Amino acid sequence: MADRSIKSLGLSKELHAYLVDHGSPPDEILAELASVTRERIGQLAIMQIPPEEGALLTFLARLIGARRAIELGTFTGYSALCIARGLAEGGKLLCCDVSREWTDIGRPFWKRAGVEDRIDLRLAPALETLASLPADRCFDLAFIDAVKTEYWRYLEKLYGLIRPGGLVVVDNVLWSGSVIDEAEQGPDTRAIRDFNDRVARDTRFDRVMLGVGDGLTLLRVR
């Protein structure tokens, strides 16, 4: 049986540790945030992205020189911290979440990491926040990790917000392998399958799907 603590499918605990150690392992602040999340939230801490995914988000933000980013689904703030660290000088990250309880866990760690002033947290359904933003295509990077049944609607809204050449990163696109198991017909699974199928036909983006974490799709806006 797969180790549920290892979100990257097919990796043993030992191989995952090797992968993280030979990439950009989490520093003390990120490691402590992950630990505090497990202590306070228990089994729901599985929703937190794994360290290699966080390192990739920082890397991608730096790679494209992102100054303005948006995150849909902040949880306890690990991914937000990673993205904020990768932003260019003067950069801003708009975080969309509905839970003050969970996001409050992350706030002290944002401050310790020196990125608190880069993060604008808005507590409201992500679609409401997206609808309030001007369609001026000024964002460089987006990360989708919120309500799975809303993934396609998120992407449709984001298309008018992300500049040409900008990047949309979508989490959980493999959904623990359930996307290829026809016996799995839950609403989240069906929504992610539908999202993946639509994206595969969408000519507005260059795309690649990666086996990082629970599956990541990278979409470059054409």
Image: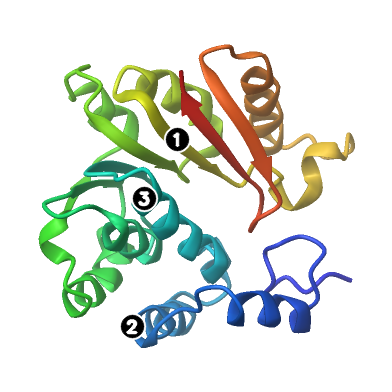
Mark 1: give few (<14), some (14-19) or many (20+) Cα within 10 Å: many
Q: Amino acid at mark 2?
A: Ile
Q: Quick one: 61 or 110, which is closer to the camera? A: 61
Q: Quadrant of residue 11?
A: bottom right
Relative to 69, does residue 102 appear above or below in the rendering?
Answer: below
Q: Quadrant of residue 208?
A: top right
Q: Quick one: 50 or 191, which is closer to the camera? A: 50
Mark 3: give few (<14), some (14-19) or many (20+) Cα within 10 Å: many
Residue at screen point 27% across, 58% down: 84
Q: Which residue is mark 1?
A: 168
Q: Quick one: 35 or 51, which is closer to the camera? A: 51
The N terminus - image quarter: bottom right
Q: Amino acid at mark 1?
A: Val
Residue 83 pos. (x, y %): 34, 56
Relative to 190, does residue 201 appear above or below in the rendering?
Answer: above
Mark 2: give few (<14), some (14-19) or many (20+) Cα within 10 Å: some
